[in-house]
Image: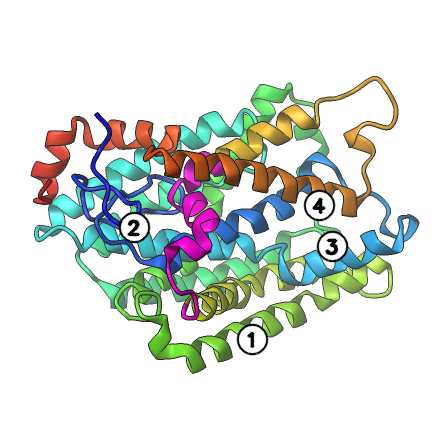
Amino acid sequence: MAPARNGFGHFRGFPREEATTLSDMTRTAQRMLTPDVARGFMLLLIALANIPRWSPDGDLAGTDLVSQVWVLTRTLLVDGRAYPLFSILFGFGLASIAARYDDPRRGAAVLRRRGRWLIVFGFAHACLFPGDILGLYGLTAVLLAGMVARRRHTALIVLACFIAAFSVLAMLAVVPPDGSGSPAELAQLPWPLLAVTLWLAATVGGVVMTATVPCVVIGVLLQRTSYLSSPGAHRGTLLAVGAGGLAAAALAAVPRALSLLGDGPGSGAVAVQIAGGYAGGLGWLALIAWGCSYVPGPSAVRLLTAIGQRSMTCYLSQSICFAVLFLPSPAPGGLDSLTPAGAALVAAATWLAIGVAAAVLDHCGLPGPFEALSRRLIYGRRKEVRDATGAAT
């Protein structure tokens, strides 16, 4: 028998907790609209940001005008902005889960268990996609679980500021001017070993070398406010933060955009662009929250909420679809020869197709398969979930 559903198409009989972006769909009697919509839209940004890994842009000067405009737009507003948004939502979810537990030790234990399983999912994902982020989020959850569950916000803020400063300085020192990847000797490794090596470096080093931890802390702090739960009360602030954040992020990416055109200095451009991700991620979230304040109800954005509630399944499905679509083809003129604009259309179409599948699952009252697996691994049997959270059927 399918779980009972309320009038909004959500589930009853499961713990009332906010889902982390990558680990689990929450089925609750009452969900906030903004985080789900943000997760759904975020996965479109991630698809657009990830597609160059499968279909490289190539020489920008030698491509068509539409592709040039698109790559520059992506550089200013998408690259290095989608994952900070992801991190903020992840932190918001962690804090929301911890808030459901009266005993901080139990809340921390749940967060660590979720984090450990995210690391396992990330390891498997890395064998398919070289840009996995699940492992980094899992490790972050394990390391920050105690402070998040005990609401040690001062310690979190100090830690976030230290890591933000260190990561920006480190990126300025070590990121190549052109943003190129790993050393040549690494490229000679067989694919499985190369994938695991790069994943380990990105997961462990990413804790102090990316915007992930500071943005997770931003999300944790946001959970204590009403900006996402009641965006209608903060429209002016949200619009100002959204417009200002995206403008600052675009400005920070100008050196990188100029270097792509060959008209600007490449040194430090990638690092400055990445540093602008803090403003970009927060700007996107504020703008989405502002838009959600005008949405009449969940049905108006059902596609986005269906994706957002199944974000882990949709995220992994994107990698699977891209891996299949961009299999090496001996025939000329395949997908591997797409222009950057054409590749972006493929990314958007893939996101939409996965979104339609998520909407079908939502209509049938079903979670995503990876959400169902994650919940079973983390919580065990359904009765144990209710006992652990005190949620009534």
Identified by mark 3, the residue type is Pro
Residue 140 vs 380, above or below: the answer is: below
> Do tag 1 and tag 2 residues touch (Cβ < 8 Å)?
no
Instruction: Give left or right: position of 255 versus 264.
Output: left
Query: Which badge, 1 or 4, is on the more N-terminal residue?
Result: 1
Separation of residues labelled 1 and 3 (CA atoms): 29 Å
> Do tag 3 and tag 2 residues touch (Cβ < 8 Å)?
no
Disc nearest the viewer among 4 and 3: 4
Mark 4 lies on residue: 344
Residue 10 vs 266, above or below: the answer is: above
Q: Nearer the viewer, residue 386 or 11?
A: 11
Mark 2 lies on residue: 8
Q: Is residue 303 visible?
A: yes
Helix, strand or loop under label 1: helix
Query: Which badge, 3 or 2, is on the more N-terminal residue?
Result: 2
Model colouring: rainbow
Separation of residues labelled 1 and 2 (CA atoms): 31 Å
